[in-house]
Image (cartoon, rainbow, N blue to C red):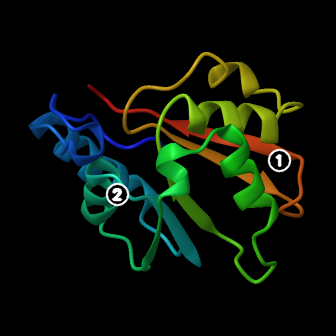
Amino acid sequence: MRHARAADGSPDRARRLSDEGREQAKERGRQLDGHFDAAYVSDSSRTKETFRLLQLDVDAVEMSELYLGSHQTVIDLVQSLPAEQETVLIVGHEPTISAAAAILASTSPRVHEVRGGVSPSTAIVLEFDEWTGPGTITDVLRPQS
């Protein structure tokens, strides 16, 4: 998932969500309401705030690598997940999230929906037989506004 819409500001890592972004995160939380075994979140203010507003019943692991890293960081994280973590949420940034999803689900019929990037608060739902892939895009949840 890409974090919800952020307000302008500096430094970048400290940017918070805009009013619109807070509403987006709450909306996405209602859509994602379900069981997650784990959540991995960039350590930026806007991703942590997005995750908090999702109001999911799971603790988040904050990872600076998700702020600074490339799509390969997300791919490596997914491919190293333990089998007992069956449903996982990753909250990060663009273009990292869409690029990682496009590579992880490169043969998915819906990959064209994420190849060009995704807007704030978009969640890309992928299913895997095994975390090592390949995955299939089963849904792309986009904000209403």
Q: In front: 95, or 52?
A: 95
Q: Residue at x 42, y 80 (%)?
A: 59
Identity of the residue furthest to the left in this view: 19
Residue type, label 1: Gly
Q: Position of residue 64 (x, y in %)?
A: 47, 58
For mark 1, does the 10 Å Cα neighbourhood hold few (<14), some (14 to 19), or many (20 or more) residues? many
Q: Hey, which quadrant is residue 17 in on the image?
A: top left
Q: Residue at x 42, y 26 (%)?
A: 119
Q: Badge 2 is on which residue? A: 29
Q: Is residue 51 above or below residue 101?
A: below
Q: Position of residue 145 (x, y in %)?
A: 26, 25
Q: Give the SS element for disc 2.
A: helix
Q: Badge 1 is on which residue? A: 135
Q: Residue at x 58, y 39 (%)?
A: 97
Distance (Cα) linking label 2 and label 1: 23 Å
Q: Residue at x 73, y 43 (%)?
A: 72
Q: Is residue 118 above or below residue 25?
A: above
